Image (spheres, grey):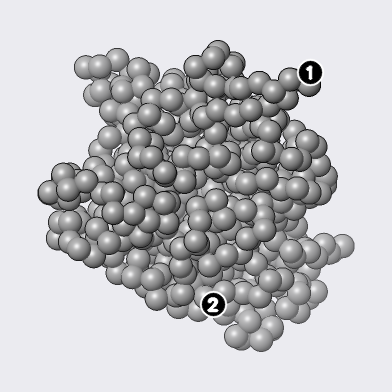
Amino acid sequence: MRLLNNIKQITLVALLGIGMESCLDLDPVIYDKIIPENFYKTESDAKAAVTGIYSPLGSPGDIYGGWTETFWMINNLCADDMGTQRDDYEFMEKFQWNSTTYAAYKFYNMFVKEANRATLVIDDLQKSPIDDDVKKQYIAELQCIRGQYLFFLYDFYGTANVTTDVEILRHPENEIILERLPKDEFIKLIETDLKAAAEILPVSYDDSEYGRLTKGAAYTILEKLYMQEKRWADAETYCRKIQGLGYKLQPTYSSVFSIENERNNEIIWALPCQSETNGNGNTWTTHVLPPELPSFWTNSKVQRWNVYNMPWKYYDHHFQQPGDERAMAPSLITEFEYISNGETKLASRNNGYPNLVKGALPVKYPEDPTQISEKAGNDVVVYRYADVLLELAEAINEQKGPTQEAIGLVEQIRARAGIPNTIPTTATASKENFRDFILDERGRELYCEGHRRRDLIRHGKWIQSAVDQGYIPEGREADYKHMVLFPIPQEVIDESKGKIKQNEGY
């Protein structure tokens, strides 16, 4: 049966509610026996099962961890805002992946599996005797998680061979071959989940439940889907719904990501992290910091691997405005002083310091003074309000041109960065000019947060960005146009007996 890999194992995990290695402050329940008579009888049973579906999202897990082959890092590495110091991972940065590149196809089966796991748990919850209101909220949460996994699939691979038919999922012995859904059906599946979830999910949770998906998260995933589909009016509608939920920009850029200011009002969804040795920590700064600790970084216990950088070409294009806080330490490091053998030295791109040769250091997350190894306690920020305001400005501009409202939304972001009233008049002279300016502003505000690849694809500049970086020969853009998507695993094609087709070009 070609449903997904290890369907029986998935059913088992869904029943047990195990595998929870995420950052949420919830403990799964593990049962000795799997029989209907003792399962989902209590709210804690149901909560454990729902929590288990978050597992791959946890940092430093497969999706939002700092390790080089997570979904987050693959998204960053193949865009122009992040590069790598490691030669063995340049294949993603340099557009050298193909149908046999594991890092490119590995997430297909994971996301299909997790979407189907959510479907099974929804079915179990519907049969559970727990309180109806609690049940509805957990089902809504699962619909939101499933919608997120489906959007991940759509973003990376296009459509997929998923199903919401529980009978098919529960009976792998029937050897049913599922084909990839048509595009319109797949999009409708995502929409239906997210809209249903948003109707029920709360705007926020108390601290003990922080990290669970909310109404704002459901709206954000939905408007991002509409942005990619260029359904500008729909995107505007849901951005405005988010505006009405009480989010607001933080006073300073770096405070959005600081451990002292966690759970601030700009964050729509974040993954809670701990810095303990055995905790689920944020490994971003460990992967960015150089061996020589900058003099302003007081915690010497943090590990420093210097894997990632921001290419100088990207930096030089985006950060020419004096006073832009987003281009300053500790957010973005272009040079720094350090102590070596009792002597103060300067590390700079201009003096041959090896860890600044390829690019600046996008530290992004300020120091965690409690960090003792590779894991920081700064929550991983997935979606935030500044991103939504810029998408709203873009959606308005695409429909009406650079209106005062659209310009004002971008101005809010720039004012917070310390550069108010500096949008050039040429940038607002036409829809086309403002479109380009918004893309650049998103590049300044959201660098290395995993949005850049989608932004470039939406603006039709994805392949051109690879040409500009020297990774694709000029004049051969058509030979690489298929790389807006990644390949699906060959095993999926083989097991479907040809009913599932590889993405065009691979």
- Other-residue count near label 2 (Cα within 10 Å), few / some / many at <14 / 14–19 / ≥20: some
Name the kind of residue labelled 1 in the image: Asn
**Above or below, 431 relative to 168:** above
The residue most toward the right is 32
**Above or below, 312 relative to 173:** above
Where is residue 126, by image quadrant?
bottom right
Q: Are marks 2 and 1 in contact (CB under 8 Å)?
A: no
The quarter of the rendered structure image containing the C terminus is: top left
Q: Which residue is mark 1?
A: 341
Q: Secondary structure at mark 2?
A: loop
Mark 2 to mark 1 CA distance (whole Å): 55 Å
Q: Which residue is mark 2?
A: 202
Question: In the picture provided, is 429 more to the left or to the right than 45?
Answer: left
- Other-residue count near label 1 (Cα within 10 Å), few / some / many at <14 / 14–19 / ≥20: few
**Above or below, 13 relative to 348:** below
Question: In the picture provided, is 450 more to the left or to the right than 29?
Answer: left
The residue most toward the left is 430
Question: In the picture provided, is 342 more to the left or to the right than 90?
Answer: right
Name the kind of residue labelled 2 in the image: Pro
